[in-house]
Image: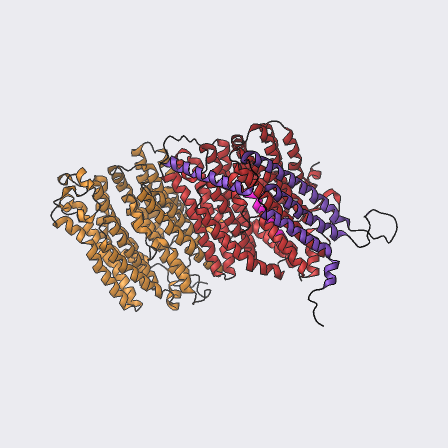
Amino acid sequence: MLAMIEANLPALQVVLPMLAAPICAMLGRGARAWALTMVAVLLAFAVAVSLFVATLDGTIISYRMGNWAPPIGIEYRVDILNAFVLLVISGIALFVLPYARASVAHEISEERQPLFYSAFLLCLTGLLGVTITGDAFNIFVFLEISSLSTYALIATGAERNKRALTAAYNYLIMGTVGATFFVIGIGMLYMITGTLNLADLAQRIAEHGDSRTLRMGFVFILIGVGLKLAMFPLHLWLPNAYSFAPSAVTAFIAATATKVAIYVLLRFMFTVFGFDYDFQAATLRHVVLPLAIVAMFAASIVAVFQDDLKRMLAYSSIAQVGYMLLGLTFLSHTGLMASVIHLFNHAVTKGALFMVAGCYIFAAGTSSISSLRGIGRDMPWTTAAFVVAGLSLIGLPLTVGFVSKWYLVLAALELNWWPVALLIMASSLLAIIYIWRVVETAYLQPAPEGVVRKEAPLWMLLPTWGLAALSVFFGTYAALTTAAASRAASALISASNMLWQ
Amino acid sequence: MTDSTILLLAIFIPAGVTFLIAALGSRPNLRDGASVLAAIATFIAVLTLLGPVMEGARPEVALFEVMPGLLLAFSIEPLGMLFAVVASGLWIVTAVYSIGYMRGAGEKKQTRFYICFAIAISGALGIAFSANLFTLFIFYEILTISTYPLVAHKETPEARKGARTYLAILMTTSIAFLLVGIVWVWNIAGTLDFRAGGILDGKLDPSFAPFLLALFAFGIGKAALMPFHRWLPAAMVAPTPVSALLHAVAVVKAGVFTMLKVGTYIFGVGFLSKTGASDWLIWLAAASILIASIVALTKDDLKARLAYSTVSQLSYITLGMALANQMGVIGGSMHIATHAVGKITLFMCAGAIYVAAHKTKISELDGLGRKMPITFIAFTIAALSIIGLPPMGGAWSKWYLMLASADAGQIAIIGVLMLSSLLNVAYLLPIPARAFFAAPSARPAHSLGAAAAPGDQIEEAPLFCLVPICITAVGCIVLFFAIGGLYEFLLHIPILPETTP
Amino acid sequence: MEEIVFDFGFVLTHYNYWMFVVLMMTGLYITVSRGNLVKKVVGLNIFQTAVFLLYVSMGKIVGGTAPILTGEPGTVYSNPLPHVLILTAIVVGIATTALALALVVRIRETYDTIEEDEIIALELAMDTTAKASAAGSER
């Protein structure tokens, strides 16, 4: 029995939440649906942990879906990189769910809750599926599963603010265009190679060499995934979607959805196209690098002027995506490491920050910064969590943000890219401004009169503090994450060095 | 107990006592007692370490590895020992003084005040004992964050604005320059340990050395080198004990201490003088000394004048480092001690004047010397020490700095130092002169404070304020006669690389 | 030999790709330019259908039959894989369209319009009133 479970772990990772989703929809009550979701997420997390442990030593688990041999059948391929991402996604889900119970009960009506949890599970399925699969078309399918459920989840925010509907609609249009671009790109690759298996694709592309079709394929995939990960200037859907979605949803997708897209990009760039693909290197340096830097500044500056906390954090996310893309463009071991570490670190930090925003909405009914005056006294724990996670976003030592910045700057200096190193730091100064604006309002301004605000319930506080504490823990014992990221980067590089020889 | 245990104790007693202070928040007497006791305990711990260190022991302790190769580690060498003794010794004095001041001035939120104060001392000791740049940076930022609430203590719009400037400049410089400098050092030297003779010789291209030095000189914003000195006057909105201990001793001295430490143990004095990398810094420091003195002349607010005086005096220490010879390092380190004792006295006098007479302007002090003779005698002694006249401790540090200038062949700098002493006379001595010799102002209702405390009812500040002032004033004189021992001790600061293989 | 600048034969024999490009750009243009939310969805559908065509025509082999085993050696089959893939993509496309239309229905219910410019005007008005009330509460 155990052996069977062990042999089928990669399939279980995706199938468990997927099976739970329809059952969830049929349970008539919110509490029951939540309990089932919790069980599914716990199981998914357990599976992710065991996959991570299994791949830590560099093993690559290859699983044949339905026992069809690749490249015809769909292969699930788990190496250290995607095991790490799986762990991040399911881990964040594990933190978000206990939080979601109270938050969702507050923001969504009882009869819709089972559907909400069902969509949540589908979204999780999609994200896990994208990460685990080794088949290009399968990535598209899972990407759409997660995206469609995300659109629905965002639209459930309409009970609080009807603008959630238009936000979801716009995201749907842009997301679908992105996904379709992605499919076109895959089609191009298929035309050249006749395969969809990622490992197989890599080999045949390398044999085939550069061609115009390959370039088109690369560009389509870059733009398609770029839309999903809110690469500047393809980020227009993100601020509204994050601002108007229910708090739990924002915390979840902000921490996971863009990260998964980054993973897809990493996978395609370094496993499929390979490190030494000149056109890719040129595109990264001349297009993505400037865009990433512009994102770091433009989005941070816009964030400074936002009045809504969630919206401010959303713009901050766009800036942070810039850091992750920047790490890619260095095309070095340290750069990749920085991207992978920041992927994790930002998930933890931003998850905590959006949860804090949710706590404010729960207790004060609004996340508008000007109405948060003096809230540090009424909600000391929540606000303290904001400070901790905020410091991490700024990148102070002993928080995860510092680790990310350290490796990013190190990667820039290794290449002697002076201006880039200084720009990275300069842009994180903008984070000080927008984070500190909130801290100052919350602590140093007198509370408006006649407003009663109580501390958020324990089950919302615990996950919030859990993530905030993690952001300190992994900033203090960064050896854990850096080791994983370093191995993932090495795996990507060594796999791609075998190509293009 | 081993030396390493005591070392950790010294750092963690102040941090640990915060819990006690928080728990005793509702009982002011016990709380203040705990804070004084903690100060005494810390000082005893530091003094216990002093003996072994004077005999040549170098206690070390490594806590854990934060990132691969980057340890949170402490080790003691003479320079750090000196800073630790100064900071922890003056904490006792300030802790006693705070009781008198905070109660006398009727400040609110005293518990938060004491908590942040203790954390700040912990940060300062951490800086003093850090074994590598990474650890130093961590505590440097802890010091910045923990002093922010102290500066913003009054929560008035001016306090908020001052605190914002304070945080903005300190954070900006430390993240944008210092951190980049640290990563650069790590990138080329592969280590961040403080080692005798520096770690950069032979690894850094000498033509880049001035740039790296600039990153440090401007990055260490706490050293208040112009043009990044604005935070220090801004921080004067804080209650006076904060200005006294933190902005005359702990915070600013942490800055110049870091400067000395970087000059001696990262660059190495030999490397600096060989490459001439610090020549430009000599002139910047000299300019900073003179300009700040001239600005101090124009200030009527007592604390603002003292703040600019501090900016000027801090540049003496930076100058000592930039001169890049042994005398410079000794003179600079000595100035840490002599200036600390002198300036804390001046600030505490300013606080006593505020508590007793509610006066903050120099122009209002006429005739006050007869009502508060002890305060103003102490003020005069300290002022003479800052100016550098025997028999006050300040005379010696200036003497050694002049020797260092002569050693370095910078005759013009000797002129600058003498001119600066004259300026010191011009901006410091008029204050006691007015208080003692000018006739009391004929317009008693000039300020609101005077109305509250009519001229003839002003008397000396509470005993809690007065005793610390006397102690430090006597300290200024004692330092003059005890300088031989200090000089011997500072000779142990290793200038050359260790010759043992 | 001079380089052929415009190879007419090449264009003609690859007409299926030209169709794809034309359809794709038509769809994308409609999606971007139309203000009516339903028309946007229609554009999106045309856009997606173009991609289906791309895949389907890519798998077609001249003279090939449907990939059903006939037992005769030498039979040329079309490549079934892209065709199968596109079945999945069609399902995804239908789901997207359904969700989009459901959203449009909800938008119509709450905003009373499905014209983008009117919605934007409404949302701007919401913003200003929200700001005004926030400013009012500050006083």
Q: How is the image coloured?
A: by chain
Count of numbered badges drawn on the protein:
0
Please report the residue visible at 73 percent of the width from the left and 57 percent of the height from the top.
C14
Residue positioned 39% across, 40% down in the render: A441
- The colour with which the image depicts chain B is orange
Q: Is residue A327 left or right of residue A373?
A: right
Residue B425 placed where, x, y %?
20, 57
Query: Which residue is outermost to the right?
Result: C72
Residue A389 position (above or below residue A487):
above
- The spot of residue A8 in percent (x, y) is 69, 41
- Colour purple maps to chain: C
- Name, please, the residue furthest toward the bottom: C1
User: Which colour is chain A painted?
Assistant: red
Q: Is residue A88 magenta?
A: no
Highlighted magenta segment, given as a residue range: A254-268
What is the quadrant of the N terminus of chain B in the image?
top left
Confirm whether residue A397 shows in the render. no
Residue ID at (70%, 53%): C19
On the picture, is A387 further left or further right than A221?
Answer: left
- Percent position of residue C101, x then y: 62, 38
Residue A124's quadrant in the figure?
top right
Where residue B147 sits, quadrant-wise, is top left
